[in-house]
Image (cartoon, rainbow, N blue to C red):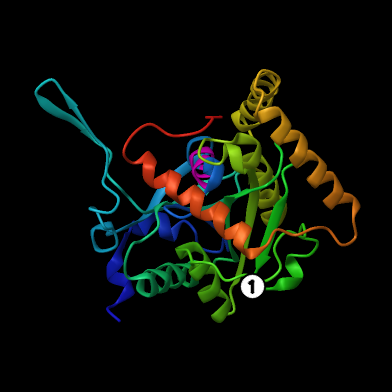
């Protein structure tokens, strides 16, 4: 393996300011299944609503497949006016009470996963990181009219009890965030994550209630002072708009009613009905297919 330290550049003065902090590292990367854009919403909220300072920048030219995920560019009349370039950046952030944490955002690497994991965990060791935390959304057969279910996972299973019984044991394609958590566990470092269950009919859009539920779990796990800010009002507005849409949609209304019955039966039963592996796989495959289609045009499905 090539030297992982050559994958990033650190700002020494920012690194020195973290001495004795033992911060939490929250990683919210884009590129894998993220129904409702949960990770993206959280990353934008934490980066924009709190005091963030660039700590380390990764050499993403070594990690990104530009022909697979092309950066957006704007052409106006006769010239290129902008480039939405990709960047994988580690920030030092202060919460509402001034407590420091780290935030890693950007696209997940396309290549050199083991080296990138070693680079991030090497930095985590140098900065005395206390734990790694992540969040995402997955499409599930749940209604928007009920509280968002969240599945927790951790390198210490005792820290992830009382999960909603939807998935027992299943083999799925791995994400970089999952590998990072697994490698952290191998090093004896605590890694935790939270997966918000997003109604499958809303998965391609931006679903703020799921991001809000994930933020609540991240806040509880880390003790950070992270007020929801605009996320709370956006979530309320989204649910209100959905109520109007359901009332006027002859197909969506019956679907939601059926999902409500299934949800309520699951909550009431000691041995709830669990979707099969095939059903879970089909939901994920449909979501990924829709995401691939989005690259060719406008987003599909309701936007919240």
Q: Is residue 146 visible?
A: no
Residue 32 % position (x, y): 46, 55
Residue at the spot of label 1: 155
In front of the other: 135 or 9: 135
Is 42 one of the magenta-colored residues?
yes
In front of the other: 234 or 130: 234
* Quarter of the image where one finds residue 274: bottom right
Residue 72 % position (x, y): 27, 38
**Is 255 on the left or on the right of 204, as rendered?**
right
Q: Is residue 78 visible?
A: yes
Residue 169 % position (x, y): 67, 71
In front of the other: 265 or 96: 265
Vertical arrangement, residue 134 with respect to residue 251, above or below: below
In front of the other: 104 or 64: 64
Is 135 one of the magenta-colored residues?
no
Residue span colored magenta: 38-46
Q: Residue at x 73, y 48 (%)?
A: 149
* Quarter of the image where one finds residue 164: bottom right
Residue 44 % position (x, y): 48, 39
Vertical arrangement, residue 72 with respect to residue 30, above or below: above
Q: Residue at x 90, y 55 (%)?
A: 269
Query: On the rendered image, what quadrant is the N terminus found in?
Result: bottom left
Element class at badge 1 = loop
Q: Residue at x 63, y 54 (%)?
A: 195
Specify the principal SS of the magenta part: helix
């Amino acid at each position: 393996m090539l030297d992982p330290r050559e994958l990033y550049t650190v700002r020494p003065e920012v690194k020195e300011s973290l001495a004795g902090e033992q911060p939490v590292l929250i990683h919210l990367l884009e590129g894998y299944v993220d129904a409702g854009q949960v990770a993206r919403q959280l990353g934008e909220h934490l980066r924009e609503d709190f005091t963030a300072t660039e700590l380390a920048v990764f050499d993403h030219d070594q990690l990104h497949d530009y022909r697979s995920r092309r950066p957006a560019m704007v052409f106006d009349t006769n010239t290129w006016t902008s480039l939405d370039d990709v960047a994988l950046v580690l920030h030092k952030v202060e919460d509402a009470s001034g407590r420091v944490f780290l935030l890693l955002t950007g696209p997940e690497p396309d290549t050199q996963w083991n080296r990138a994991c070693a680079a991030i965990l090497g930095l985590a060791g140098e900065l005395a990181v206390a734990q790694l935390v992540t969040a995402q959304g997955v499409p599930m057969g749940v209604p928007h009219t009920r509280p968002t279910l969240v599945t927790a996972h951790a390198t210490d299973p005792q820290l992830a009890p009382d999960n909603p019984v939807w998935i027992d044991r299943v083999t799925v394609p791995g994400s970089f965030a999952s590998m990072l958590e697994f490698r952290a566990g191998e090093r004896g470092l605590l890694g935790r994550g939270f997966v918000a269950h997003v109604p499958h009919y809303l998965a391609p859009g931006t679903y703020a209630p799921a991001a809000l539920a994930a933020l609540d779990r991240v806040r509880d796990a880390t003790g950070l002072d992270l007020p929801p800010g605009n996320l709370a009002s956006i979530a309320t507005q989204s649910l209100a708009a959905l109520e109007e849409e359901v009332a006027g949609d002859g197909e969506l209304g019956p679907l939601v009613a059926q999902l409500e019955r299934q949800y309520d039966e699951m909550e009431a039963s000691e041995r709830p009905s669990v979707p099969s592996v095939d059903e879970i796989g089909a939901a994920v495959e449909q979501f990924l297919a829709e995401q691939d289609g989005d690259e060719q045009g406008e987003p599909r499905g309701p936007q919240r």
